[in-house]
Amino acid sequence: MSKPTIGQSHTVIQTLANNVNWDVLDHTILQKIVNDPTEAGKQFTAFLKNGGKVIVDSPRIINIDRSIPFDPKFIGEGWSIEEQDEKSLALTEINFSEVMFNSTLEKGEKSIKGEDNLKRLKEKNCIRLDAGIFKTLWENQILIPEKWKEKTKGNITYIFFDGTILRSSRGHRSVLCLYWLDGRGYWLCIWLENDWDANAPSAVLASSTLVSET
């Protein structure tokens, strides 16, 4: 992929500015863009990547760039990768319609330790989505289906990516999760020694699901 020139980028901005129907826009919306330029930049980048077309619905399939492995420094200094789901690492695209939210809670259980949850996921032999997929979604949140942002029984849903187990400098085994609050995405890295409940599902695929080709 060839990078745009500075002159080309300036021309695109000028073309858009000259052709926007400013009379139909609300000044409060424009002010939100001014107040949050980082988020506006992400949305505008997605708009340009889509050929200058508005993305009405999230795409069903997204590509996962595996050329650059997930760097645990994303979390902070001293973090390392302890183990990963090799089946997840082999995926180069994800079909959202085939992703399942798996809670391993059994009848009568209100919570389970993260390590026990991980053990049960492994026993199910499902594909546990990894940190590389998490990073792709975090950097391109406009691609995430609205269903992923819904609450679970009125509580915030924390979607875990158990395909990558991380270890902090203090020795805590942890996994990443995404969640939404007040219309914005956030992430956390949670210790596996903590409790998992019904609003903390794992994003997984069935082991027989074919979502990439070699």
Image (cartoon, rainbow, N blue to C red):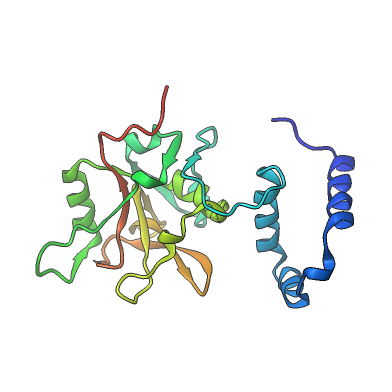
Measured as percent of width and height from the top left, residue 151 is found at 37, 70
Q: Which residue ends up furthest to the top in the rendered image?
A: 214
Along the viewing direction, whichever of 167 and 121 lies nearer the viewer: 121
Measured as percent of width and height from the top left, residue 204 is found at 31, 47
Along the viewing direction, whichever of 63 and 27 lies nearer the viewer: 27
Residue 26 lies left or right of residue 13; in this view the side is left
Q: Is residue 109 visible?
A: yes
Picture residue at 37% right of the left edge, 59% below the top: 159
Snapshot quadrant of residue 196: bottom left
Q: Quadrant of the N terminus?
A: top right
Q: Quadrant of the C terminus?
A: top left
Measured as percent of width and height from the top left, residue 13 is found at 84, 51
Picture residue at 37% right of the left edge, 46% below the top: 97
Q: Which residue ends up furthest to the left in the rendered image?
A: 108
Residue 113 lies left or right of residue 140; in this view the side is left
Residue 11 lies left or right of residue 60; in this view the side is right
Snapshot quadrant of residue 101: bottom left
127 to 37, vertically: above or below: above
Q: Is residue 178 visible?
A: no
169 to 88, vertically: above or below: below
Snapshot quadrant of residue 157: bottom left
Count of numbered circles in the view: 0
202 to 3, vertically: above or below: below
Measured as percent of width and height from the top left, residue 24 is found at 78, 69
